[in-house]
């Protein structure tokens, strides 16, 4: 018994003896029970519920929590960041990986922007989510083009207006623009109307800048099920694309670790997940691209990964890599 307890007992006994002390204890007990019911129980229930919610979201949060998306800072950033030209030069160890002499940006309109893609050679589709974000997107685009490669950008619709200039530049360079929904919502948790709004609003925003509708959607957190696929198809006629190699760039935020993660796992036909939000991802791409080219990979868009091999990306279907199948 501590001092307070001893003091309480003394007072209780001193004032009115054993019976009254029992009465006091009874009221004290009732008070505690009351407090538990009124205050603690709702908190406990809430705790249990949020734990359940968290458990349900584990796979989602493992990827990119929405809160990690940087706020738009257009006024500070746009078009004032020069890309580090030196960083895209091939290394001495990779003499075969030469930057393309003339960027194919001028030749869009022809198939694959005028690039020759050999369906019998290795290819990989580098994909970038959650942008655009000018300082990073711009570096990635220039690096890919310097090696005659193109990427696929799954943009968040509500960022399109603020980053319209880099989005248009990316599209004009022959890269593929696709949607990552309007506001990065988990489509499995939305109503039919909610999914439709996420799809159509983002498609309209993209079309208003590049002049055509996207044909692919990457569901935020990779969260997809049969219902989501059907709703995405109904709302926009889009095919769904996830990935077969996860760079975990949002977690590592270290160029060398990101490059190693990809190089250790990449195979012909893979779709690689990255995010054009982080400087470390731009740096990783500058190191990664020459390595992939040296290994014989053609850097293609998701659409090119399928069409050059005679395959299609059908509306309402989910794709990870081409050819599909187990790792
Ligand atoms: Ni995302």
Image: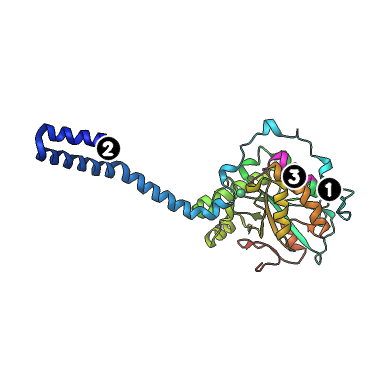
Calculate the distance from the C-alpha at mark 1 to the C-alpha at mark 3. 14 Å
The picture places residue 301, in percent across and down from the top left corner, at 74, 55
Mark 3 = which residue?
283
Report the magenta residues as a range: 130-142
Q: Secondary structure at mark 2?
A: loop
Mark 2 = which residue?
2
Q: Secondary structure at mark 3?
A: helix
The picture places residue 321, in percent across and down from the top left corner, at 68, 62
- State whether residue 213 appears in this view: no
- State whether residue 182 appears in this view: yes
Res 146 label: 1
| Tag nearer the camera, 2 or 3 | 2
Question: Marks 2 and 1: in contact by CB < 8 Å?
Answer: no
Look at the image and say whether residue 95 sits in the magenta stretch. no
Residue at image position (73%, 44%) is 282
Q: Nearer the viewer, residue 272 or 134?
A: 272
Quarter of the image with the N terminus is: top left
């Amino acid at each position: 018994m501590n001092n307070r307890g001893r003091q309480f007992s003394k007072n209780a006994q001193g004032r009115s003896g054993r019976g009254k002390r029992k009465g006091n204890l009874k009221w004290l007990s009732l008070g505690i029970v009351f407090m538990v019911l009124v205050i603690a129980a709702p908190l406990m229930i809430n705790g249990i519920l949020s734990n359940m919610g968290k458990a349900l979201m584990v796979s989602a949060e493992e990827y990119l929590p929405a809160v990690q998306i940087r706020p738009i800072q257009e006024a500070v950033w746009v078009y004032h960041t020069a890309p580090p030209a030196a960083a895209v030069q091939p290394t001495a160890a990779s003499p075969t990986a030469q930057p393309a002499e003339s960027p194919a940006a001028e030749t869009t309109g022809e198939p694959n922007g005028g690039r020759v893609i050999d369906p019998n050679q290795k290819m990989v589709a580098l994909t970038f989510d959650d942008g655009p974000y000018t300082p990073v997107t711009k570096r990635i685009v220039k690096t890919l083009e310097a090696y005659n490669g193109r990427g696929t950008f799954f943009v968040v619709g509500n960022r399109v207006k603020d980053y319209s200039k880099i989005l248009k530049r990316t599209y004009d360079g022959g890269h593929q623009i696709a949607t990552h929904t309007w506001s990065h919502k988990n489509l499995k948790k939305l109503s039919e109307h909610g999914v439709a709004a996420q799809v159509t609003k983002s498609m309209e925003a993209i079309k208003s800048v590049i002049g055509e509708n996207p044909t692919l959607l990457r569901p935020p957190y990779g969260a997809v099920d049969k219902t989501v696929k059907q709703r995405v198809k109904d709302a926009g006629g889009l095919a769904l694309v996830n990935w077969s190699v996860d760079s975990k760039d949002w977690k590592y935020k270290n160029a060398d670790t990101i490059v190693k993660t990809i190089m250790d796992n990449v195979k012909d036909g893979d779709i690689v997940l990255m995010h054009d939000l982080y400087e470390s991802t731009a740096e990783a791409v500058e190191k990664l691209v020459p390595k992939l080219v040296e290994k014989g990979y053609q850097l293609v868009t998701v659409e090119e990964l399928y069409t050059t091999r005679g395959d299609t990306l059908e509306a309402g279907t989910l794709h990870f890599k081409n050819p599909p199948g187990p790792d």
